[in-house]
Amino acid sequence: MAGSDENNPGVIGPTNHQGGLRAGGGKLMAVTGHNRRALSTINRNIIGPCAVNKRPLSEKFAAQLANKQQLKAKPEEAKKAALSVSSSSESEDCTIIDVDEYRLTGDVPMFVQHTEAMLDEIDRMEEVEMEDVVEEPVVDIDMGDKNDPLAVVEYIDDIYNFYRKAESSSCIASNYMAQQFDINERMRGILIDWLIEVHYKFELMEETLYLTVNLIDRFLAVQPLVRKKLQLVGVTAMLLACKYEEVSVPVVEDLILISDKAYSRQEVLDMEKLMLNTLQFNFSIPTPYVFMRRFLKASEADKKKNFVVMTLVEQLELLSFFMIELCLVEYEMLKFPPSLLAAAAIYTAQCTLSGFRQWSKTSEWHSNYPEEQLLECSSLMVTFHQKAGTGKLTGVHRKYCTSKFGYAAKTEPANFLLEAAVRLIL
């Protein structure tokens, strides 16, 4: 059943210097390399008279390997390809072995078995490679807001690029307390912890709190202050932040009352002038809040809008803001830029709720922070979470232990992030 006629439609022409077999018209063809033993020698040892007309190895075997599945699925096309190859290589001989006949007797040549196994292994490796290159897609988080003029989808990327540049040029020095002679970071923490409670009691907008803290730090970074004036700086900063962010601004008398009448109206107004001139009326500073809103949108983009998921979304937002407010009190967190604080707060909240490390490609894309860059900041947040209900600075913990804030402070800290951060450092 073997022959060497290149016009035989059951023949698939030689292909490659590597050697191999190929199916076509119910037959398999064996080829050999120039630097190997003649096929006649192999055939004598294995299958005797079944090998006919030995020849050098062809250069098309790689193409046959790549098209193995197509040739199996379309035998008619395989035959046409065989005719084309054979007509273009009339001077070459080929060996035709009828494997089907040997399958009936159960005596398939050994080199045929080896080649078929090799082809199957190549197919398996190709499938694995295809699985490896499948990556998590980056979700277009603005797709649903294209018809909302308030979402400014056309400009949103440019806006946040501007925020990035602005935060890099307006970050507060993390060691500014070294130039203060009468106050320290502990006093700053007490002041901000108290202002968080004042902010909650007055039911002010979230943006107001972050701007208040920013104004305090920027003012103290350039203006030496005696400790008895520190609370005055705090209430004045909140008054200025309210004028910038709020629709309805608390009156000066309310702020004096909340500070137990420690200062007069004139003192508040004088401090307001001093702060405005010191800060050169520059209040348009990106705080962690603006990044929080964008990054939260990215973290929620791939979630379906059903009741259970919406509940998880609300929990994520509340827990994220709990983390970031814990950082407002801590002086050491000034070393991180606002965008990193926001990304780390959301990352820590996600890990806390899920019980494992979680940071999607969409979140990484929009925050510009890979997971490795968040671990140091996130581990500090876990530490703050662990001790939030202890000591004297518990204003944030009490605030987030209420039903209004979803009892976020009562969640178990993500302690496994501490181990991840240690392994990263080591």
Image: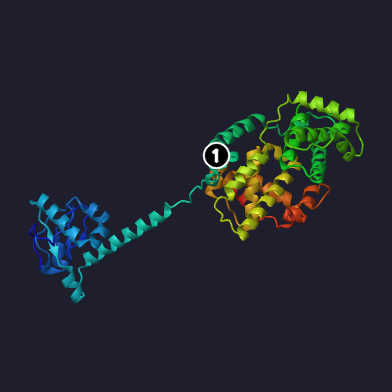
Category of crowding for the residue at label 1, using alpha-carbon neighbours closer than 10 angstroms: few (below 14), some (14–19), many (at least 20): some
Give the x, y percent position of residue 156. Answer: 56, 37
Name above or below for residue 277 compared with residue 397: above
In this picture, residue 224 sits left or right of residue 60: right
Residue at label 1? 153
Name above or below for residue 48 compared with residue 302: below
Q: Which residue is pictured at 54% across the width and 52% down the height?
A: 302
The quarter in which the N terminus is drawn is bottom left
Q: How is the image coloured?
A: rainbow
Q: Which residue is pictured at 81% across the width and 41% down the height?
A: 195
The quarter of the picture where residue 119 lies is bottom left
Q: Nearer the viewer, residue 252 or 356?
A: 252
Give the x, y percent position of residue 33. Answer: 18, 54
Q: Circle 1 sits in a helix, a strand or a loop, which is it?
A: loop
Q: Nearer the viewer, residue 301 or 28?
A: 301
In this picture, residue 101 sits left or right of residue 148: left
Give the x, y percent position of residue 105. Answer: 18, 76
